[in-house]
């Protein structure tokens, strides 16, 4: 009899392991994992889809070909994906090989951004009905390998939308402005906190129309497209973060995004 139970447990374990192995996704994607009603994670983002509760897990770009561990020792495999490459020329070499002072400045600013990304609120849950923040032409997609003046740089984990300087940028969803800055790489810069670790940032603006701690509604103007910071022309560099991980912005602006996760 014991042997019988042992075999059942063994085959169940095998089944569960195989089920786990079947969860996989692309870098920059969000995976929805069904959670038990009694075991709802309090800090991570959960959503209700068709009467069930799901935790949203972002898949990091730098975990390609590996797995990330989630609750109950389950894991999600991050596929290897080739997003292509982008090569740009920047004539102003002081923007590429930084002086000591500029490197110090850029480092300090990266720390400010890093700390801000940790400081999100959990007052309101984000609504997943995101709209594209600016009308324009997509000039660089998420995940491209980048070369500046033929030297390899970190991958492009944002979406570039090219538009004329002065084109209106709107909040893609409601949120709170938690950072405004004038930064070395990003130029005039805004971070919106949408709640529960979902944040978005806006770089290279020519004009900022909001102030820190201001609440914005979906579609409300936050600034204008520009070419401040390190750029080759006017565009919006739009980054979407979930749990500090940069995800693919084009996924979140799809219609019925949440349903697409099932
Ligand atoms: Zn960009």
Image: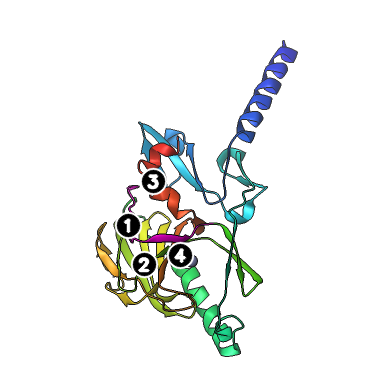
Dot in front, 4 or 1: 1
Kindly identify which numbered label has been placed on residue 117: 4
Q: How crowded is mark 4: few (under 14 residues within 10 Å), some or many (20 or more)?
A: many
**How far is mark 2 from mark 3, CA to CA?**
21 Å
- The mark nearer the N terminus, 3 or 1, is 1
**Which residue range is magenta in the image?**
127-142
Judging depth in this view, the residue of 165 and 245 nearest the camera is 165
The residue sitting at 67% across, 17% down in the picture is 8
Evaluate if marks 4 and 1 touch, with contact meaning CB atoms under 8 Å apart. Answer: no
Dot in front, 3 or 1: 3
* Residue 88 magenta: no
Residue at label 3?
254
Residue 43 seen anywhere in this rendered image of the structure:
no
69 left or right, relative to 108: right
Evaluate if marks 3 and 4 touch, with contact meaning CB atoms under 8 Å apart. Answer: no
Q: What element carries label 1?
A: loop
Evaluate if marks 2 and 3 touch, with contact meaning CB atoms under 8 Å apart. Answer: no
- The mark nearer the N terminus, 2 or 1, is 2
Q: Is residue 28 above or below residue 14?
A: below
Dot in front, 3 or 4: 3
**How far is mark 3 from mark 1, CA to CA?**
12 Å
Residue 151 seen anywhere in this rendered image of the structure:
yes
Residue at label 2?
163
Judging depth in this view, the residue of 136 and 204 nearest the camera is 136
Q: Is mark 3 on a helix, strand or loop?
A: loop
221 left or right, relative to 139: left
Residue at label 1?
172
- The mark nearer the N terminus, 3 or 4, is 4
* Residue 141 magenta: yes
Q: Ligand 1 near label 2 (Cβ, under 8 Å)?
A: no
The residue sitting at 67% across, 47% down in the picture is 66
């Amino acid at each position: 009899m014991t042997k019988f139970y042992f075999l059942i447990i063994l085959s169940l374990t095998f089944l569960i392991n195989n089920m786990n192995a079947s969860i996989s996704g692309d870098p920059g994607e969000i995976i929805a994992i069904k959670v038990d009603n009694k075991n709802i994670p309090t800090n991570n983002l959960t959503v209700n889809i068709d009467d069930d509760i799901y935790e949203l897990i972002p898949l990091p770009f730098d975990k390609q070909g590996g797995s990330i561990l989630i609750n109950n020792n389950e894991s999600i495999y991050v596929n290897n994906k080739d997003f292509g490459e982008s090569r740009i020329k920047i004539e102003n070499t002081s923007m590429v090989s930084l002086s000591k002072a500029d490197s110090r400045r850029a480092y300090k600013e990266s720390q400010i951004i890093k700390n801000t990304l940790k400081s999100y609120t959990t007052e309101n849950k984000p609504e997943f009905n995101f709209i594209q923040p600016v009308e324009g032409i997509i000039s660089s997609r998420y995940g491209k390998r980048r070369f500046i003046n033929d030297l390899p740089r970190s991958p492009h984990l944002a979406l570039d939308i090219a538009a004329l300087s002065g084109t209106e940028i709107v909040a893609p969803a409601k949120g709170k402005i938690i950072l405004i800055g004038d930064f070395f790489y990003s130029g005039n810069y805004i971070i919106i906190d949408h709640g529960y670790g979902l944040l978005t940032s806006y770089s290279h603006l020519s004009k900022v129309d909001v102030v820190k701690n201001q609440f914005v509604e979906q579609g409300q103007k936050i600034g204008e497209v520009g070419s401040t910071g390190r750029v080759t022309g006017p565009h919006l560099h739009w980054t979407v973060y979930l749990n500090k991980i940069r995800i693919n912005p084009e996924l979140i602006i799809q219609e019925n995004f949440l349903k697409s996760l099932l």
